[in-house]
Amino acid sequence: MNDIFLPDIPDAYHDYKIVQVEHTDKVIEGLRFIFVELPKFKPTNFKGKKMAVLWLRYLTEIDEQTRQAPQELLDNPEISKAVTQIEESAFSDAQLWWYDDFWDAVRVENTLISDALREGMEKGIQEGRQKGMQEGIKEGIKQNGIQNARGMKAEGIPVGIIAKITGLTLDEIARL
């Protein structure tokens, strides 16, 4: 870019990878953004200046109308690789349609999977809550029965009657 992108960083070259926001270890390999800030780009030797000129020629001379890159650019391995990648990425209208159609199908499938997972999780959470509430109610009833049994036992009420009223077993009451 013919502008200053990051004024507080002296480097002219910035290489960004695409990562998943929540899980930064998940990186989309092969897809990157590289910015070269031309005002900061100052080659210091002849080789660097020659490379700068070749890359500037590449950036200004190679476009969608280019059918054959100049041999001087193709003689440089890095620029030759860039030309090859541009050629490989030059899809026809039919290829672009199939490519878009493929990614639409992938997005639909991902949405369906995400929705199914979300529904399954919500159902699981709801079932877990219900089961937890039922177990909590049972435990609360049991604790209430134990508390009542202690009180009745302290008052001298026969163990058989306490068992009938509280639902506790004779052994449970005996251990109180």
Image (cartoon, grey):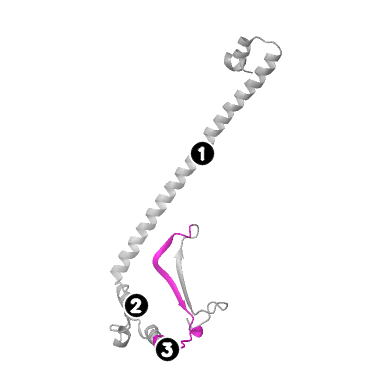
**Inter-mark Cα distance, 1 to 3:** 66 Å
Disc 2 residue type? Ala
Front in this rendered view, residue 130 or 37 = 37
Magenta stretch: includes residue 122: no
Q: Amino acid at mark 3?
A: Lys
Which residue in the structure is indicated by mark 3? 49
Image quadrant where one finds the C terminus: top right
Q: Residue at x 56, y 33 (%)?
A: 133
Q: Which disc number belongs to residue 126? A: 1
* Residue closest to the far right: 155
Q: Which residues are magenta?
A: 23-52
Return the disc, 1 or 3, that comes first in the chain's sequence.
3
In the rendered image, residue 173, in percent from the top left (x then y), is placed at 61, 16
Residue depicted at 44% across the width and 47% down the height: 117
The answer to whether residue 28 is left or right of residue 132 is left
Which residue is the site of mark 2? 82
| Lateral position of residue 67 relative to residue 135, left or right | left
Tell me the kind of residue under disc 1: Gln
Q: Is residue 26 magenta?
A: yes
Q: Earlier in the sequence, mark 2 or mark 3?
A: 3
Along the line of sight, the residue nearer the viewer: 81 or 100: 81
